[in-house]
Amino acid sequence: MKDCYWIFEGEDSEKCYFGEDCRYTKYSLDFLGSHYCEFCYEILDCVRCNKLFYSRDCADCRDSYFLSSCFDCTHCFGCINLSKKEFCFFNEQLTKEVYFQRLSELSLERHLSAIKAKVHAFFGTHFFREHQNKKSENALGNKIFESQNVYNSFDIVG
């Protein structure tokens, strides 16, 4: 741990603040369950993410906001249950130009609470994945990532 503040259950992390269960995470703030992440804010149970904000149960996502159960997504906003997508806005596929135009129209800094309410309502119209296991074989439990032959376990990475 290096230059961290109010971190619990941390390992080899740097410049992280107000978090729990971080492993190999850098420059992140307000998180619970962050493994191999950088420049993230308000994330929950995310693995190998970069510049991810207000998101949960994601892996290999970057430059995105308000994601839930997404994998390998880039430049997405308000999306749920997506895999290998880019430039999606509330699960709608957009062009790069339209995506950035919509993002700029949101004025995230000024309307954060209203945007959070809209995202929460949108997520409520979708099913959540039964489990968030990814890249695992013979795994029984939940949130098992890149593991094999794991049974009755939770929050396992590697």
Image (tube, rainbow, N blue to C red):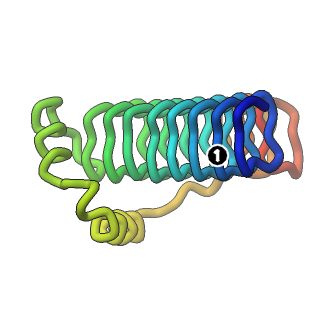
- At 32% across and 34% down in the image, what residue appears? 75
Q: Is residue 110 above or below residue 72?
A: below
89 relative to 150 in the view: left or right: left
Q: Residue at x 57, y 46 (%)?
A: 29
Residue visible at 22% across and 40% down in the picture? 93
Q: Please tell me which residue is depicted at 38% across the width and 46% down the height of the picture.
A: 65
- Residue count near mark 1 (Cα–Cα under 10 Å), binned few <14, some 14–19, many ≥20: some
Q: Which residue is mark 1?
A: 17
In the rendered view of the protein, which quadrant contains the C terminus?
top right
Q: Secondary structure at mark 1?
A: strand
The picture places residue 106, in percent across and down from the top left corner, at 18, 54
Viewer-closest of 128 and 109:
109
Question: Residue 54 location, x and y as percent?
Answer: 46, 53
Tell me: residue 51, above or below residue 110. above
| Of residues 116 and 107, the one drawn nearer to the viewer in this rendering | 107
User: In which quadrant is the N terminus drawn?
Assistant: top right
